Image: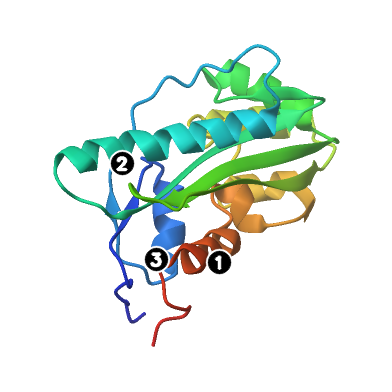
């Protein structure tokens, strides 16, 4: 693939290798600077509001860090959660909890929500959330145990990776596939164009 240079510098404020891969697949050149923030959910905070706040705080934390270095790049930040029956499912603590999460998701439709933001120090900022419905097959216990044992879902919300072996768990989705992976790239690219970080896309 021929790589292209963005119209303005880009920074991905995330340690997620999936988000890095998604942006790289677009041909974009960017730096990766993870954000260290408190990711505690506020009482009665709706999942979409929570992800948007997390994305915004990640973006602002990295912006403040770069401001001190007199850098003013465009920032992309995101946070993804899995919601089942109005409950947020985070990353499993161990393989036993991963199997419990997968059993809860089996045969059900859950929602993957990614809050994301694009902006820079002087603005403008766009903060939104994108939702995708994901329906799992009615899984057998041995399938759940075998997948949990692979460890693939240990660092992922909901304990599965749709882009990996976890694809066999999924019957269907409604919405953005890349959102389930961790970043709704079509939405983010359009936001980058809107704020002026990219003049157009693809860039010749």
Q: Answer above or below: position of 89 versus 10.
A: above
Q: Secondary structure at mark 1?
A: helix
Query: How far is disc 2 from disc 1 in space, using C-alphas?
Result: 21 Å
Q: Secondary structure at mark 3?
A: loop
* Location of the N terminus (image quadrant): bottom left
Seen from the viewer's position, the closer of residues 190 and 179 is 190
* CB atoms of marks 2 and 1 within 8 Å: no
Residue at the spot of label 2: 63
> What residue is drawn where x is 48% and y is 31%?
155
Name the side, left or right, on which 187 lies relative to 120: right
Crowd around label 2: few <14 · some 14–19 · many ≥20 (10 Å)? many
Numbered label attached to residue 190: 1
Residue 60 appears at what percent x and percent y?
38, 37
Q: Answer above or below: position of 21 versus 145.
A: below
Residue 91 appears at what percent x and percent y?
54, 25
Query: How far is disc 3 from disc 1 in space, using C-alphas?
Result: 10 Å
Name the side, left or right, on which 199 lies relative to 84: left
Q: Secondary structure at mark 2?
A: helix
Seen from the viewer's position, the closer of residues 178 and 28 is 28
Residue at the spot of label 3: 197
């Amino acid at each position: 693939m021929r790589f292209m240079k963005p119209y303005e510098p880009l920074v991905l404020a995330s340690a997620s290798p999936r988000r890095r891969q998604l942006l790289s697949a677009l041909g974009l050149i960017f730096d990766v600077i993870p954000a260290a923030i408190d990711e505690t959910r506020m009482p009665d905070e709706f999942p979409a509001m929570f992800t948007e706040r997390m994305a915004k705080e990640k973006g602002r934390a990295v912006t403040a860090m770069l401001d001190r270095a007199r850098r003013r790049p465009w920032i992309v930040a995101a946070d993804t959660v899995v919601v089942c029956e109005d409950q947020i499912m985070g990353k499993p603590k161990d393989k036993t909890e991963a199997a419990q999460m997968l059993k809860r998701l089996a045969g059900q439709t859950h929602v993957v929500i990614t809050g994301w933001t694009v902006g820079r120090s002087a603005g403008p900022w766009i903060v939104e959330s994108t939702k995708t419905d994901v329906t799992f097959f009615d899984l057998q216990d041995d399938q759940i145990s075998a997948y949990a044992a692979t460890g693939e879902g240990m660092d992922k919300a909901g304990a599965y990776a749709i882009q990996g072996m976890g694809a066999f768990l999924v019957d269907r989705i409604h919405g953005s596939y890349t959102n389930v992976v961790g970043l709704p790239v079509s939405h983010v690219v359009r936001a980058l164009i809107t704020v002026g970080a990219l003049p157009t896309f693809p860039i010749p």
